[in-house]
Amino acid sequence: MAGQSPDSIVFFGCKTDCNNQTLRGKCTGFDCCQTTVPSSGIQRLNVTLESTTNNMNTCKHAFVAETQWLESNKTDPSNDVQYLNYVPVALAWTSIINLTFTEAHINECEDERQKYPRYQCPPDLECENTKGSYRCNKRKSPLKIAILGVLIGLIVVLICSSCLYLVIKQRKLIKLKQRLFEQNGGLILQQKLNKEGNSVETTKIFTMEELKKATNNYDETLIIGEGGFGMVYKGFLSDNRIVAIKKSKIAEKSQIEQFINEIIVLSQINHRNVVKILGCCLETPIPLLVYEFIPNGTLFEYIHHESIASTISWETRLKIAAETAEALSYLHSAASPPIIHRDIKSSNILLDNNYTAKVSDFGASKLVPLDHTQIATLVQGTLGYLDPEYMQTSQLTEKSDVYSFGVVLVELLTGEKAVSFDRPERERSIASYFLSSFKDNRLFEVLEKHIASEGNVEQLKEVANLASRCLRLKGEDRPTMREVTSELEGLRNIKNNSCVDGDVNDNVRDNVTLNLTMGDEISLIEYPS
């Protein structure tokens, strides 16, 4: 072997003896030999094989390899070298600073294949260069490549189209919610809320997503009330508050200004016997209302459910009646402008854990202009509670609420539903049947049994008399809710006096003492003998 440097030619080499026998072991001079290539200044290397016996027919191989690799990997070069695809070779170069060694990498597919045809792959295979070697892979079909390209293109187009569709859909949804928000008076409501300031600081405009999440997308298992005006769901807000969310079925699109005013007015009401409104959602076709959650259900459930009806004593029923009357009196007289509920019934009176009455469901309510005593409107309400005069004239007044409250009083006294087609025809309307029984002195025949036995007879007759006056056909003949409230509170102060066989002790009334202050109203009631 001859190595050429810029200044000189360096000769080096080795010699081995062959006796045509295959020897196993390291390259020690028998059957093979090895020598070290000088590392100083060699830029070119020539290898020459010569035979001393003129016998060159046997296979002879010479190759340059990295010393450490040769010592650790090849124990029989004469036998294995012909099967080697590659051996590592280290090239060295010097610089002024230091001496660095690196492993040479050759692209056998491009270079070596031209010099050594044995590296070429068969025609049906293609060469792939690897680190220090190459491999022959199956050629990819142009048709398959084209199909794969088309599929990848289609997938890319599909993904881009889906993303574009979702973006467009999201933008349309945002525009729709904004349009509904404005259509439902959201801008007006925001302006009024800002104008009112702290008086309505608890009122919030909820987003559609907030209420969907609160009700688990309006899960049917969370329905806690259902009526002609919509469904009421139990909801859980993100701040852990439990609320009641009313999803209405009917919306008066022409009354947006009035709807907004109603929310503002109800937001300002802070009465212990009126369910507090917490906010609304205006991003849906029909606005949603959010109220405080009252945990103990409705009065209807307590007086008409057989298993629990007897647990509501007469004293508790009288308390519920007085609190409901007080709430209606507040709406009629203290609210500005006055509010007519228009759908007073036992299912719209909620009870908390202390059986405190909470008037709810203002979906049919109307605001009364200060210079009006009645409103011409389409008749709305619940069968059995509707004011007959209102049904005939379509003129809504506060006395319409008085009539409906009278039906609730009858429910509390009798334990019967307002309307039931399971009863005989003359008893289907409990209000009519009660009035005829009371007129014929058969009151205790229609009273609920445990109420008749445990209640103060005088109280029962006086409450029955009050109910009959609330149920008069002409609104002008009915008492106001303020008068009803005053009478019920007075009756609650009457001591529970004993009586025999349901007969009233007429002398009891002579000993009643009323504690009055300036401004209290006194109602004198005339009772039949």
Image (tube, helix red, strand yellow):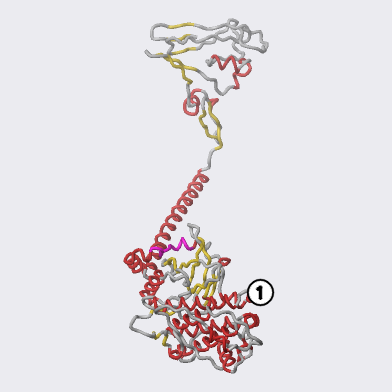
User: What residue sits right under mark 1 in the picture?
Assistant: 307
- The percent coordinates of residue 393 (x first, y second) are 43, 90
Q: Is residue 442 left or right of residue 96?
A: right
Residue 372 forms part of the magenta stretch = no
Residue 209 forms part of the magenta stretch = yes
Question: Quick one: quadrant of the C terminus?
Answer: bottom right
Q: Which residues are magenta?
A: 201-211
Picture layout, residue 61 above or below residue 444: above
Picture layout, residue 304 above or below residue 138: below
Residue 278: name its quadrant: bottom left
Q: Amino acid at mark 1?
A: Ser
Q: Residue drawn at (44%, 79%), measured in percent from left and top? A: 516
- The percent coordinates of residue 56 (x first, y second) are 59, 11
- The percent coordinates of residue 286 (x first, y second) are 44, 71
Q: Is residue 397 left or right of residue 302?
A: left
**396 or 511, which lies in front?**
511
Q: Is residue 81 left or right of residue 199?
A: right
**31 or 69, which lies in front?**
69
Q: Residue drawn at (33%, 67%), measured in percent from left and top? A: 196
